[in-house]
Amino acid sequence: MGDRLAVPLHVGLVGPLATADLAHLLEPQSKDLRLPHGYGGAPLLVTLIETLLARGHRVTAFTLSNDLPDQPDAWVRVGGHAGSGFELICCPMRSRAWRGGQGWPGRIVDLYRMERESLQQAMATVKPDVVHAHWVYEFAWAALGAGLPHVITCHDAPLRIARLNSGSRPTRSIYRWLRVLMARQVLRHARSLSAVSPYMRDQIQSWARTPVQVVPNAVSPMAITLGRDRTLPDAPKLAMVCNGWEGPWKNPRAVLRAWALMLRHRPDLELHLFGADAGPGELAERWARSHGLAHRVVFRGPLRHEELIQALSTLDLLVHTSLEESFGMAIAEAMALGLPVVAGQGCGAVPWVLGDAGAGLCDVAAPASIAKAVLSVLQAERYAELSHAGRRAATQRFESEQVVSAYETLYRQAMALCSTAGLGS
């Protein structure tokens, strides 16, 4: 356990948070109200919040929700359990990216101006000791505008993502390039920056005016608790976690093309697909059936984070074919569970995250390479070695107490910097 700050802080954590993921931290009566649903997609932030609270800090979480009126002052404040030191603030987010309504254009047209104004109002009202914003877009830009000590954590490579989307439909491509402009604004003006991997640091350092510190993502304590050193079962069950079948860089079809090759050698294998578009009858299953690739595939769809961790703990190997990862939470949590991982060599931060457990690296653009890597890992001695190495690496490098201890150091530095400068942005 890392050293704790002598004086607890009031941390404003700003980023995408779903109310459902935070329900266990909210006052019981709040659950009976019609709360804003928040902004899903980043359960890793819940792990940070829980760890900060456990270490004695007060936390106010700020997020966006598109079921509130399109007015900057329409934010909603929800208390946590009595004495918990937690509260949640949901600010309005326009439902449409391009088409306007209620007197506002679409949110990307003015680069999320209303959303940023609302977040800034809320932060300026609450006045946490330090604001920790995640991703380098609307949340981080609002944090800079609030005029408070700040730490900005970069979770993706804006330019890389925009380029990967260049072949998409025009609105999606333009949307991503406008997000690049937002990121440039944030990175040019941020005074305290971190990135979740050396790969991410290298992607953004030239845009920043301050050195970027590397602090990895924290894996769920649940994954560490459920983790165990594994031996190869008789009929292995594989997993793939992919949120979005249509995204150009997640590369999910490569797994199913490789699947046919795997079954020729190991007809006892079973593949479980998790994530958006991967449920029964959804895009992934329809595509697989149309190509004759659905044999012994279980389409399980999106699950809540805890349910996903529980489900993965019952499986035996993760196949992850994303063409680019800034970190790779699915990879890190599979490692913590003791699942060997087959993933892409040269695919962003993937080799760094895997470390000594990276013997399953392959060319994820080539189905034959994926199949060969999976079959190679599914050898008894090799499988057991990778299970142990991955679990050890995840607990040593990505355990939540260590990660939050590193962030506490950045919080101290940010507060000292702003105290010396006499300003917060």
Image (cartoon, rainbow, N blue to C red):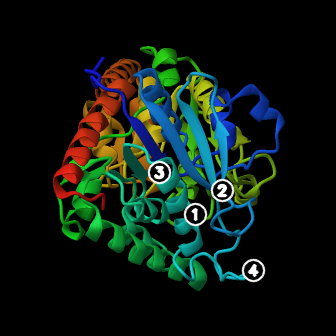
Residue 81 visible here: yes
Q: What residue is shown at x 57% (from left), y 85% (from top)?
A: 170
Q: What residue is shown at x 52% (from left), y 22% (from top)?
A: 222
Q: Which residue is mark 1?
A: 118
Q: Amino acid at mark 2?
A: Trp
Q: Residues within 10 Å of mark 1 (few under 14, many from 20)?
A: many
- Label of residue 101 in the image: 4
Inter-mark Cα distance, 2 to 4:
18 Å
Q: Nearer the viewer, mark 2 or mark 4?
A: 2
Earlier sequence position, callout 2 versus callout 1: 2
| Front-most of residues 396 and 258 | 396
Q: Is residue 407 above or below residue 225?
A: below
Q: What residue is shown at x 59% (from left), y 72% (from top)?
A: 114
Residues marked 2 and 1 touching at CB (< 8 Å)? yes
Inter-mark Cα distance, 1 to 4:
17 Å
- Label of residue 1 in the image: none
Residue 339 visible here: no
Earlier sequence position, callout 2 versus callout 4: 2
Count up the numbered dots: 4
